[in-house]
């Protein structure tokens, strides 16, 4: 699809919001790049992991902004993002200190990311779609009919 520039996001994980889907695709691409680098030289590339964490922060902020703009309660999802960032940051620190195997981390990262999309982001996609539908309905309905001052 045009909105997903790299095309690594599986169709079944698309949530129907172009900006969020494009960011999810970007994350899958970064994970693929890290896997390819690992196969080449087996070494963790710390700058790339730090960049990935920074991209997750940006991505989580994007989802929160979309929810807020649509008037959707995002508190549980935001708590999950905070928890995930803590876990990812700790994992990257463990990688740096040699306490975590890179292959194990990448396997976990992909599994966790897919689970997060299925458990949280898809629900956000549905609620954003509902909010869009409500918005376009209220734009179509004539204002003020049936109301008295
Ligand atoms: Fe997401
Ligand atoms: Fe999320």
Image: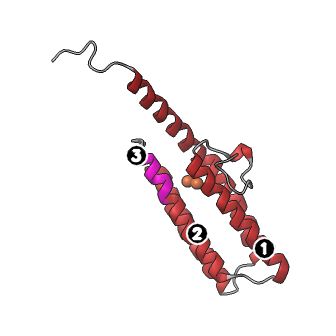
Q: Taking the image as four quarters, which one is ligand 1 found in?
A: bottom right
Badge 2, how many Cα within 10 Å: few under 14, some, many 20+?
Answer: few
Of the numbered discs 3 and 1, the one sitting upstream in the chain is 3
Q: Residue at x 78, y 77 (%)?
A: 37
The outermost residue toward the bottom is 97
Pick whichever, 69 or 94, lies toward us: 69
Q: Secondary structure at mark 1?
A: helix
Pick whichever, 64 or 145, lies toward us: 145
The outermost residue toward the left is 149
The numbered dot on residue 42 is none
- Is the C terminus in the top left, top right, bottom left or bottom right quadrant? top left
Give the magenta part as a residue range: 61-67
Q: Residue at x 51, y 65 (%)?
A: 57
Query: Against 17, is 51 above or below?
Result: below
Of the numbered discs 2 and 3, the one sitting upstream in the chain is 3
Residue under pointer 1: 103
Q: Residue at x 78, y 71 (%)?
A: 35
Of the numbered discs 1 and 2, the one sitting upstream in the chain is 2
Residue under pointer 2: 87
Quote the CA–CA distance across marks 2 and 3: 28 Å
Quote the CA–CA distance across marks 1 and 2: 17 Å
| Closer mark to the observer between disc 1 and disc 2 | 1
Residue 11, x across and y down, in percent: 73, 44
Viewer can see residue 57: yes
Residue under pointer 3: 69
Q: Residue at x 72, y 61 (%)?
A: 110
Viewer can see residue 104: no
Quote the CA–CA distance across marks 3 and 1: 38 Å
Q: Locate residue 1: give its quadrant.
A: top right
State left or right for residue 67 relative to residue 146: right
């Amino acid at each position: 699809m045009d909105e997903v520039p790299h095309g690594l996001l599986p169709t079944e994980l698309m949530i129907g919001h172009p900006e969020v889907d494009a960011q999810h695709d970007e994350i899958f691409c970064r994970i693929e790049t890290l896997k390819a680098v690992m196969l080449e030289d087996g070494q963790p590339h710390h700058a790339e992991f730090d960049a990935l964490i920074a991209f997750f922060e940006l991505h989580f902020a994007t989802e929160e902004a979309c929810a807020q703009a649509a008037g959707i309660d995002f508190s549980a999802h935001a708590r999950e993002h905070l928890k995930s960032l803590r876990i990812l940051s700790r994992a990257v620190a463990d990688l740096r200190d040699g306490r975590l195997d890179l292959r194990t981390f990448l396997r976990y990262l992909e599994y966790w990311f897919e689970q997060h999309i299925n458990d949280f982001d898809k629900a956000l996609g549905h609620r954003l779609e509902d909010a869009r539908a409500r918005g376009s309905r209220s734009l179509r309905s004539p204002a003020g009919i049936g109301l008295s001052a």
